[in-house]
């Protein structure tokens, strides 16, 4: 009976995924990078939730994961991209730098929603529903909606099961009926300068999936699940205020010096 249930869940989920256009991006970042601290909360924490499953981000963190650094070099050879982070690779373009990413990424996703956009893989551009997640190099995190799927080892799990876990509305029921799935304690997923909170997690062969019991809808503030934002995230927003105060102080200093010279005369 359990096998029949899983089969029906997979059929329902896969049929839904085939009818939905998916925009895919490959994102290179590094924990500890101040520029990544500005773009990570948006690219990984907010936009996947805002686009409610239509936007998939394959994240490669390169500072802590040496395997992922090699993946970035390989992408550089394949697509002639930059070796800097943060870096976002989408079809027909690569966006580098926090300011450029924050200015352009949301519009890029919206422009591609109707027809979808494939993932920039080492073997070329591949639609998300056609790739096998087990074949992805390195140790990626796959962000879809308010869930994240994290590679932990070289062991493989059915690709259909992995994708269904990222999209099904019955994730707890599905987990209970997967023989190689084990519920574990959910952990906060670190970003550069911040983190994303989850309250449920399960371990499968080679993978961990984390999610929240109450899904965050597109109408809610998706940024609410991003915590501990580093001050670097706000530096750019406050820089003009700081510059303005500096100019005011400089003017006051010049006026004070002028008055002092006048009194001496």
Image: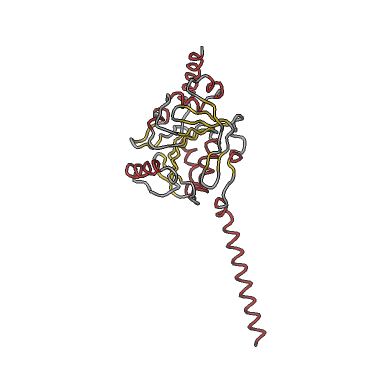
Q: Is residue 103 above or below residue 134?
A: below
Q: Residue at x 53, y 43 (%)?
A: 42
Q: Nearer the viewer, residue 38 or 63?
A: 63
Q: How is the image coloured?
A: secondary structure
> Which residue is drawn at the image coordinates 54% and 43% (left, top)?
41
- Quarter-wise, where is residue 257 in the image? bottom right
Question: Image point 57% across, 62% down: which residue?
Answer: 243
Name the residue at the bottom extreme: 265
Image vertical order of residue 186 relative to residue 238, above or below: above
Residue 40 or 203: which is nearer the viewer? 203
Task: Give the residue drawn at x 34%, y 37%.
Answer: 122
Measured as percent of width and height from the top left, residue 124 is found at 34, 36
Q: Position of residue 248 (x, y in %)?
A: 62, 67
Number of callouts: 0
Q: In this view of the protein, which residue sits in the foreground, 243 or 134?
A: 134
Q: Position of residue 204 (x, y in %)?
A: 47, 27
Q: Position of residue 265 (x, y in %)?
A: 65, 88
In the rendered image, the vertical position of residue 132 relative to residue 138, given as above or below: above
- Residue at the extreme right: 263
């Amino acid at each position: 009976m359990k096998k029949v249930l899983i089969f029906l869940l997979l059929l329902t989920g896969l049929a839904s995924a085939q009818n939905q256009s998916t925009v895919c991006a490959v994102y290179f970042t590094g924990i500890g990078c101040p520029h990544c601290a500005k773009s990570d909360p948006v690219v990984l924490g907010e936009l996947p939730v805002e686009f409610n499953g239509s936007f998939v981000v394959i994240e490669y963190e390169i500072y802590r994961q040496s395997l992922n650094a090699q993946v970035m070099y390989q992408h550089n050879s394949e697509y002639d991209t930059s070796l800097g982070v943060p870096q976002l690779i989408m079809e027909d373009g690569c966006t580098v730098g926090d300011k450029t990413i924050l200015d352009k990424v949301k519009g890029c996703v919206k422009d591609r929603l109707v027809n979808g956009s494939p993932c920039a893989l080492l073997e070329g551009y591949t639609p998300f529903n056609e790739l096998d997640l087990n074949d992805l190099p390195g140790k990626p995190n796959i962000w879809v909606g308010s869930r994240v799927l994290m590679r932990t080892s070289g062991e493989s799990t059915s690709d259909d099961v992995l994708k269904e876990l990222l999209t099904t509305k019955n994730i707890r029921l599905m987990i209970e009926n997967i023989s190689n799935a084990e519920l574990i304690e959910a952990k906060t997923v670190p970003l550069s300068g911040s983190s994303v909170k989850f309250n449920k997690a399960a371990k499968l062969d080679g993978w961990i999936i984390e999610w929240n019991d109450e899904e965050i809808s597109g109408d809610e503030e998706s940024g609410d699940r991003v915590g501990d934002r580093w001050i670097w995230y706000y530096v750019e927003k406050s820089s003009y205020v700081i510059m303005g105060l500096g100019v005011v102080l400089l003017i006051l200093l010049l006026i004070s010096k002028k008055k002092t010279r006048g009194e001496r005369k």
